Amino acid sequence: MKVEIFSDIACPWCYIGKTRFERALASYEHRDAVQVVWRSFQLDPDAPQREPGSTVDHLAHKYGISRDRALAMMDGASQVAAEEGLEFHLDRALTANTFDAHRVAHLAAAMGKGREVMERLMRAYQAEGANVADHDTLVELAAAAGLDEREVRQALESGAYADAVEADLDRAAAYGVTGVPFFVFDQTHGASGAQPTEFFLAALRQLGPRADRADAPGERGPGGREEAGRGITSG
């Protein structure tokens, strides 16, 4: 089966959801038959490419709340992350545009390092206050995860994989994805949010390879948005 995971590097709940899903996958009896595909999504496509500001201040302005209230919102996510073994420092986070970071993630996937690079990028944003729009920073992070520095820099300078990111964004729109993380199982069943590990394991067992189950359909039907969200609910 194929599991598509729509996420944004600047999304703390995506990192939490990633961790929970991967824990479920590790416990799944047929994990070797599961293909995981990371799909790009941008929560804030208008975020600056240069001189990004504080995410705390951005949230306060966006929702019309105090800075202390914005910090409290972040603390809630950080507490949940800690329960999953993740250390967040969201007070350091910068509201940087993630488009180029997603291009690097596509390069990594082509090199067989997609999971490692996605992990490194998410940790850099959520825990280290890294500017993930800065090309030098992206080169350094990708190299730390196993990519060749020259290949990463060349891809960034040439605009490589921009079409792949745009295709993912279009795919998300076709599925009706408006928030992330969002998980699509074999193009027919969708689950939104950083669901518990038990939920993901149950979904894999319900929808994945079984002796009494026919092969999953290879393409979405004409229903598009409705079919993408059918079968599994996020409640």
Image: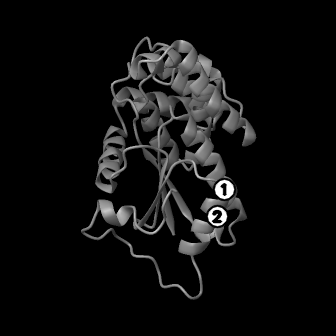
- Say if residue 191 shows up in the picture: yes
Rendered residue at 51%/48% (across/down):
109
Q: Measured along the vertical axis of the image, is residue 152 above or below residue 136?
A: below
- How many numbered discs sit on the rendered protein? 2
Kindly check if marks 1 and 2 are in contact, taking CB atoms under 8 A apart as contact. Answer: yes
Q: Residue 85 at what x, y percent from top left?
A: 75, 40
The type of residue carrying mark 2 is Leu
The furthest residue to the bottom: 212
50 relative to 67 in the view: left or right = left
- Say if residue 130 shows up in the picture: no
Rendered residue at 68%/37% (across/down):
81
Q: Residue 99 at what x, y percent from top left?
A: 39, 32
Q: Which residue is mark 1?
A: 197
Q: Measured along the vertical axis of the image, is residue 30 above or below residue 145?
A: below
Write down the quadrant of residue 97 in the picture.
top left
Q: Residues within 10 Å of mark 1 (few under 14, many from 20)?
A: some
The furthest residue to the left: 222
> Helix, strand or loop at disc 2?
helix
Q: Measured along the vertical axis of the image, is residue 62 above or below residue 222?
A: above
Q: Which residue is mark 2?
A: 201
Q: Residue 174 at what x, y percent from top left?
A: 29, 54
> Is 80 or 138 nearer to us in this picture?
80
Rendered residue at 49%/34% (across/down):
151
Q: Residue 39 at what x, y percent from top left?
A: 44, 48
> Helix, strand or loop at disc 1?
helix
The type of residue carrying mark 1 is Thr
